[in-house]
Structure formats: C-alpha cells, structure tokens
Amino acid sequence: MQQIISFLFKNKYFILFLLLELMAVLFTIQSHSYHKSKFINSANFISGGIYNKINNVKEFFLLREENLRLSEENVALKNLLNLQEKSVSQINTQNIDTAHSTLQYRYIAAKVINNNFRKNNNYLTINKGKSDQIENDLGVINSKGIIGITKSISKNYATVLSILNVNSRINVKLLNSNYFGSLSWNNKDYNTVQLLDLPIQAPIKIGDTIVTGGRSTIFPEGIPVGTIKGFTTKNNNYEYINIKLFNDMSAIGFVEVITNFDKKEILDLEEKTSNE
Amino acid sequence: MNKDNLNTIILFVGLVLLQIAVLNNINFLGYINPFLYILFIFYYPIKKIDTQFIFLSFFLGLAIDVFSNSGGINAAATLFIAFIRMPVLKSIIGKREIDYSAAHISKLPYYKAFLYIIILTFVHHFIVFGLEYFKWNNFGIIIIKTFLTSIFTIILIMISYTLIARKK
C-alpha cells in the first residue's frame, strides 16, 4: 500500500496529465453521441454572449444579402395572399373562431450568431433559448429551405445541429411524387448533401426538386431542400444521389424555428401503438 | 498579482478571442483554419514540473472546444503537447541538463526553435483531426488536413515568434 502511494506521489505529474487527458477524450466521445453534450457547447451564457457581440460586427457585412432575401420572401408572401383572397372571402366567416383554432405550427424568428460549415459535425448557434420557448428537436428553416434541428438549449441561446452533419438524417421526398428518402451528408462539399434510401422505382432526373416529407414530426411537409445534381445506380439501386441545396450554408443570417404542437400527441400515440 | 501572471492571463484570453472570432472563420482553400492559440504553449515560461501549466493548457483547449462545439478535441491535443513539451525540448537542446532560465523559446537558436515548433504543431494537429474524424478509413484526409493546416499555423507562429524574439 505504501509502495502504491509513493508511486502515485512520484508520478503525480503524469497521473494528473492522464486524468485530464481522459476527461478530454470523454468529452469528445460524449459530443459524438447525439443527445448528450450537455455543457461543452456554444449555447452556454458566456460563449453565447461573446458570439452575440462578435456577430453584431459581422452582421453589418451581411445586411445586403439578407435584405435581398427578405424582400424576395415578402414578394412571395404577397403573391400568396393575392391568390388566397378570393377563396377566403367565399368561406363562411362565422365558423372561424381564433381562440380554438387548430394551429399546428408556430414559427419563432431567430438570428444565427455562429455558423460552422467546414467541419465533420457542424453546429450553428442562435440567439433564442428556453425563455423564448425553444425546445430541443425543433426544426430550423429560412425562406430558402431547411437548415437543421435544435440540439442544446440554454436560457437565451440554442445550438442547431446543421444538416451538414454526418449524424443528421432528415426525412425528405420528391416534390412531384410521393417517394421518401432520408437526407445525409458525406462531408465533401458544404453546398451538396446526399439522398439515401430512395427506392429504385422512384423516377428521378437531374434538376428534380426535393422537399421535406411529412413523416417526421419536426418539419412540416413541403419545405424546400434542394435540387438533384447528379446520381448513379449500382446493382439496381441508387448508389448515391447528390442534392444541391437552395441555401448557401456559408451565409445564413436570420432563421425561423418551427414548433409542432401536435408532436407530443403523435409521439405518444405511436409509442402506445408499439407497446400494445 | 505579478507581471508574469498578468501577461499569461492577457495572452490566454487574447488568443482564445483571436481564435474564435477571426481564425476559425478563415477557411482558406475551403477548410484551412490555423490554430494559432497553441502559441500559448510555446510562449509559457519553462519549469521542470509545472502543474499550473498543465491545468492552463487543458482549460485553453477546453475554451476553444466550448466555442467550436467540438467536445474535448482541442483540450486533449493541447494538453498532450503541453505534456510532451519538456521531453521534446530536452532532445532538441541536447542531452545535458537544461538551464531552465535560459530555455525560453525567445532565447533558443532560430533553427532549434523552428524544429521545436514544427514537432509540437504537427502532433497537436494530428490529434485534433484524428479525434475529429475518429475512423481509420479517413486516415488519408486526416494526414492531408494535418499537413496543410500545420503549414499555416507554423507560419503564423513563426511570425509571432520573430516579433517576440526581437522585442526581448
């Protein structure tokens, strides 16, 4: 026993190093698993606050592009309103009761204060958190398409698991048919993602549009993703399908976080069914 | 608080801020972001056994990790080069006992300092990219990234080193 103690004492420098190194590797492994990285992330109040300050400067240079995108979105929304005006006026307005309206999705506007797109697992940090009713596993989009899913939440900030992440799988479908696949990323190009698990029966050609499928409870159906850029077949299966994103993932300013109010109900129901 | 401690704290905070605000967003040629923050390891005064230094390097790496959402990758790599700093330095300077007061990097001959910086930078970058990919079939890309990023880090560190050495 004494020998062990004296051995420990003699090598305390090395043991200290070993302990800290072990801790660092543990943090690394923890961050590789999907839901576990609790405090080593940029959503805590110090790093969130500092990124917020840095972003205030950076934002100035992005204003031009961001304004352009917003005005485009405004035009699109106005056109949509014009289309609906006629049909709305024909509906019997007596039945519309806003207090009990079955609103399924809520959108919360947020600002991206930090954005990675060059790494293996990319995260964004946004400036809305628990106090703005952001939870984890909510979809994040902007007017051009999907961006990611919220992961860690602090009081005023949240991190977003970008679609540019080797762990991310998002349910998508072809716009013009109902074939589903899942979206993944192979860490080659930050504007190209891959579509997996698409059945061979699905007819595709270059330029086809991909949108989110309604199967996940995170994204509403029909949010734009990108267009097919190229594909190869192997053994009578699609080997890989490259998709060019509508979004430029390197320049993202303002985003919307989507809450699905029916999510809990759907998940509860599904769990109940699988338990029976 | 004496002057050395104050210098260390300023260097620590300054390097973290520089790394996260500027250097992590350079993306030269697509993916090259130099890790200048390990300048701290080279600049910190050399002592025989220094527990404070081990802790500081760990927290330096961890600070970078917190800001770049990378788990403990930078902490592991920075701690490792902090630990092997003494053995590497000993073998570069020669087998005789080191005079610790004269072993600061700004007092080394130029080519010895250069060699010292190259070795530690390569080791650090290899650990960072190795842990980031964590798979053997990505070995090629790990080596390429290590090599290219190291070149840029070394250039930046040598520039800072020249500035520091001239000032003394």
Image: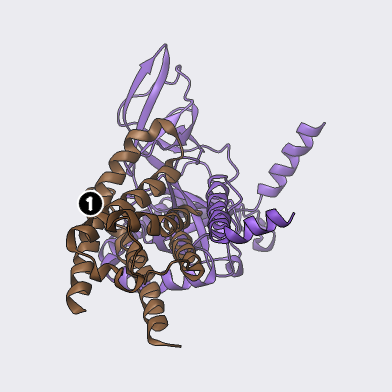
Chain colours: A purple, B brown
Residue sitting nearer the eye, B101 or A196: B101
Indicate whether A218 appears above or below A69: above
Q: Position of residue A118 (x, y in %)?
A: 34, 49
Residue A211 vertical placement versus A83 (above, below)? above
Coordinates of residue A267 in the picture (x, y in percent): 70, 43
Query: What is the quadrant of the C terminus of chain B in the image?
Result: bottom left
Residue assigned mark 1: B151
Q: Residue at x 42, y 81 (%)?
A: B5
Image spot of residue A162 (x, y percent): 45, 49
In this view of the protein, which residue sits in the foreground, B102 or A228?
A: B102
Q: Is residue B114 left or right of residue A125?
A: left
Amino acid type shown at disc 1: Ile
Residue B140 in view, yes or no: yes
Relative side of B28 to B14, left or right: left
* Residue B34 spot, x, y in % from top left: 29, 57
Residue in the image at 27% along x and 50% along y? B149
Q: Is residue A72 above or below residue A266?
A: below
Query: Does any portion of residue A115 appear in the rendered image?
Result: no
